[in-house]
Image (cartoon, rainbow, N blue to C red):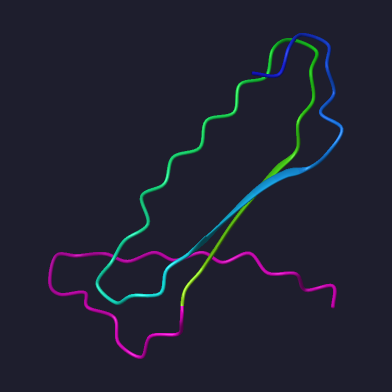
Amino acid sequence: MLPKGVRCPMELSTYFRINAEKTGQFERTILVADEDSYVSYIEGCSAPVRDRLSVTRRQWWKSSSIKNAAR
């Protein structure tokens, strides 16, 4: 809980890595900031490249990735 009027002095971040096949990522992150407060948060996740996607009829897959393109 970030109290009223407080500015968090650092950027908060979490990073999740999936190494095994047939597993999922189900983390939960809750940030609570009171009135007139400020917090910056970045979440990251990575997994090894897989060469197969198991999606069959009547299933949908949407994937988004955020990368640093400034490099």
Q: Is residue 14 magenta?
A: no
In the rendered image, the vertical position of residue 33 relative to residue 22, given as above or below: above
Closest to the observer: 65 or 49?
Answer: 49
Q: Position of residue 65 (x, y in %)?
A: 56, 66
In the rendered image, the vertical position of residue 22 relative to residue 26, given as above or below: below
On the rendered structure, is 39 left or right of 58? right
- What stretch of residues is rendered in magenta? 48-71
Q: Quadrant of residue 37?
A: top right
* Rendered-image quadrant of the C terminus: bottom right
Q: Residue at x 36, y 50 (%)?
A: 26
Q: Is residue 66 magenta?
A: yes
Q: Position of residue 66 (x, y in %)?
A: 63, 64
Which secondary structure type mostly characterizes the magenta part of the structure? loop
Residue located farthest toward the left when viewing the structure as drawn = 57
Q: Residue at x 44, y 40 (%)?
A: 28
Q: Residue at x 79, y 42 (%)?
A: 11
In the rendered image, the vertical position of residue 23 relative to residue 35, given as above or below: below
Q: Residue at x 83, y 11 (%)?
A: 5
Q: Position of residue 48 (x, y in %)?
A: 46, 81
Residue located farthest toward the bottom when viewing the structure as drawn = 51
In the rendered image, the vertical position of residue 27 relative to residue 57, given as above or below: above
* Rendered-image quadrant of the N terminus: top right
Q: Quadrant of residue 58?
A: bottom left
Q: How many marks?
A: 0
Closest to the observer: 66 or 2?
Answer: 2
